[in-house]
Image: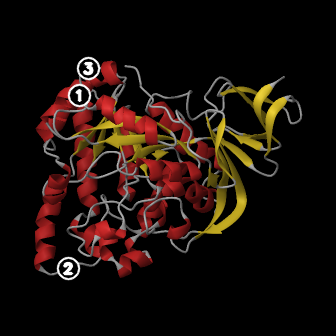
Amino acid sequence: MSCDLLIKGGKIVTPEETKSADLAISGGKIQAIGAPGSISGAKREIDASGKHILPGIVDPHAHMGYENTFDNLASESRAAACGGVTTLGIYVLVVKDGIIKQFDGLKEQFDKESFVDAFWHLMVIDAATTNDIQSCPEEIGITSFKFNMGYKGPHADLLGITATDDGAVFKGFSMIAKQDGNSLAACHCENIDIHLMLRDEFIAQGRNDYKVWNESRPSFVEAECMHRAIYLAKNTNCPLYIPHITIAEGVDIIEQAHKEGLRVTGETCPQYLTHNNEEGAPIFESNPACGNVNPPIRDKASNDRLWEGIRDGIIECVGSDLAPCNLEMKGDNIWEAPMGLGNISELLLPIMLSEGVNKGRIPIETVVKVCCKNPAEVFSVYPQKGSLEEGSDADIVIVDLEKEQTVSADKLKSAIDWSIYDGWNLKGWPTHTILGGEVIVEDGEPVELRPGQAHYLARQP
């Protein structure tokens, strides 16, 4: 058998099993999977002996800028690729006139700058983007829509978000429900009215420490809003995706929704598995504004319960919630800082391997479930993405579970100049990332971006 690329000697990981096999790639697709030594005639070979071969990571939760949707696309998509990500789910924020009129310009920028493939979610922020829900699937291939129930006040004003009340959410959910079940709503769940009340109290007290962010957005405001979003989704028959779940109770809420037969999918993020306010990251101590992330970093009990939720199949997806902002942007006032932790997509897979697989919390097959197959299925790009089946896109990451490396912000490929993982020794790193059959990261280093490397993934209703 002749092929363009042969990956030999490694262990292929699927959601069901890990087995020794060779993998042949031709024309950008997976051509064949065979017993070790059974495939020959490749134009190029990669020896993966002692390593594991996974589908390329599908990171379903990434933001690429604040003032403009794709401000940081070039640097952060390249960094994501170095972490084994081959597909991003990018939340697109447009102001004025909706997305339909701006789509061609955005896609042109994406095609020119992105290092990896991506599907897009539309941020439903105002009347124009609400109206776009109806035409997005047919006209531009967007079938997922995010509602920002947790935004009013200063941060909403910063992003131009106005459609956050329950009426606007109910209207949007109802529109999505009419699209034959192939579209879904994503919802940021926090009771913003309670936060704004507490915010005023803490500002009056002069609080500017990192722990105040969690105190001003306590766990119950997330739980209450999750219940409310699920109830609205149930009454409109709208499929619902809840991103960045941070709280232990969130696992129970999702489990109950599953027992009721509701189409509700829960996602958490690496930072909510590894960090808590009881053992704050050093950067939070030195610069509390870096602790401004919505929803907040919680407690150790939530870390543990979220790992259990992943292990038990209740939390079905893990995304980075990449939100690039450097130290200058963060400033020194936690109440005025932009949200987000930055450069998480690059570390998503290393964290899942190091803190999950190598510490015995989850098997490596579960990593493929929550970081590859499940997000690809939920967002309608499976088995093109998230799979090592014959005929799937040849998006692959080769990982060395024994490789150890200490995280340092200045050595990451991200343009963000700080990290909550600074100084962490992680065991388990990707060595090669392959997109559409082409090696785009080799020995941890990105190759030069070639024209037409990345593709926008239009999804069909």
Q: Is residue 98 left or right of residue 11?
A: left
Query: Quick one: SS at disc 3?
Result: loop
Viewer-side label of 2, 1: 1
* Percent of width and height locating residue 74: 45, 48
**Which amino acid type corresponds to the residue marked 2 in the rendered image?**
Arg
- In the rendered image of this protein, does residue 184 appear above or below residue 272? above
Give the residue at mark 1: 101
Q: Foreground: 347 or 296?
A: 347
State the mark number for residue 178.
Answer: 3
Q: Quadrant of residue 330?
A: bottom left
Residue at 73% in and 40% down: 12
- In the rendered image of this protein, does residue 242 appear above or below residue 130? below
Q: Quadrant of residue 407?
A: bottom right
Q: Is residue 247 left or right of residue 58?
A: left
Is residue 280 in view from this perspective?
no
- Colour convention of the picture: secondary structure
Label 2 vs 3, first from the N-terminus: 3
- As measured in the structure, the alpha-carbon distance from the residue carrying label 2 to the one carrying label 1 is 44 Å
